[in-house]
Amino acid sequence: MFVIVWEFRVKQDHLAEFKVAYKPDGVWAHLFQKAAGFIATELLRDRDSRTRFLTVDKWDSREHYEAFRAAFETEYLQIDARTEAFTDAEERVGVFETIE
């Protein structure tokens, strides 16, 4: 499995919009579901900092993710531009692979 983790610092006045867009059946997940190899996405909220979130996007493999990015780059960038206003900060925590 190939996993990408992102950290977001969400603007207080955009919390509801952010959660709708990034939840497991939100706009991002709908885009990911168009591609082969997508497994699931999770939205995690920090218990101590109510505006800090992590997303965990799971794919069968790095190759599936890279094929998705190549095929859906335009749609990806459009959604990214629309949701960028929801956050003060966004950082990729890392990319991870399962150990066999």
Image (cartoon, grey):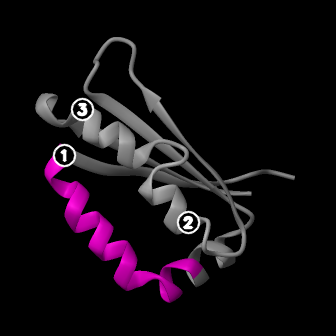
SS under mark 3:
helix
Give how far across and how far down residue 39 sits, in percent: 70, 56
Identify which amino acid the numbered label 1 is placed on: Phe
Q: Which mark is residue 58?
A: none
Task: Indicate left or right for 23 with 11 as reference.
Answer: right
Tag 1's secondary structure?
helix
Q: Which of 31 and 71 is in front in this view?
A: 31
Q: Where is residue 96 in the image (x, y as percent from the top left)?
A: 61, 53
Estimate how packed mark 1 is, as few (under 14), some (14 to 19) or many (20 or more) residues with alpha carbons within 10 Å.
Answer: many
As drawn, which residue projects farthest toward the top?
A: 48
Which residue is identified by label 1? Answer: 86
Q: Is mark 2 on a helix, strand or loop?
A: helix
The magenta stretch is: 68-88
Q: How far apart are marks 2 and 3 (CA)?
A: 22 Å
Q: Do the residues labelled 1 and 2 touch (CB within 8 Å)?
A: no
Q: Name the residue under label 3.
A: 15
Q: What residue type is labelled 2?
A: Phe
Q: Residues within 10 Å of mark 2 (few under 14, many from 20)?
A: many
Picture quadrant of residue 65: bottom right
Residue drawn at 74 percent across, 57 percent down: 1
Marks 3 and 2: in contact by CB < 8 Å? no
Separation of residues labelled 1 and 2 (CA atoms): 20 Å
The residue tagged 2 is 32
Q: Position of residue 56 (x, y in %)?
A: 54, 45
Query: What x and y, as percent, mark residue 57?
Result: 56, 52
Determine if the magenta segment contains residue 56.
Answer: no
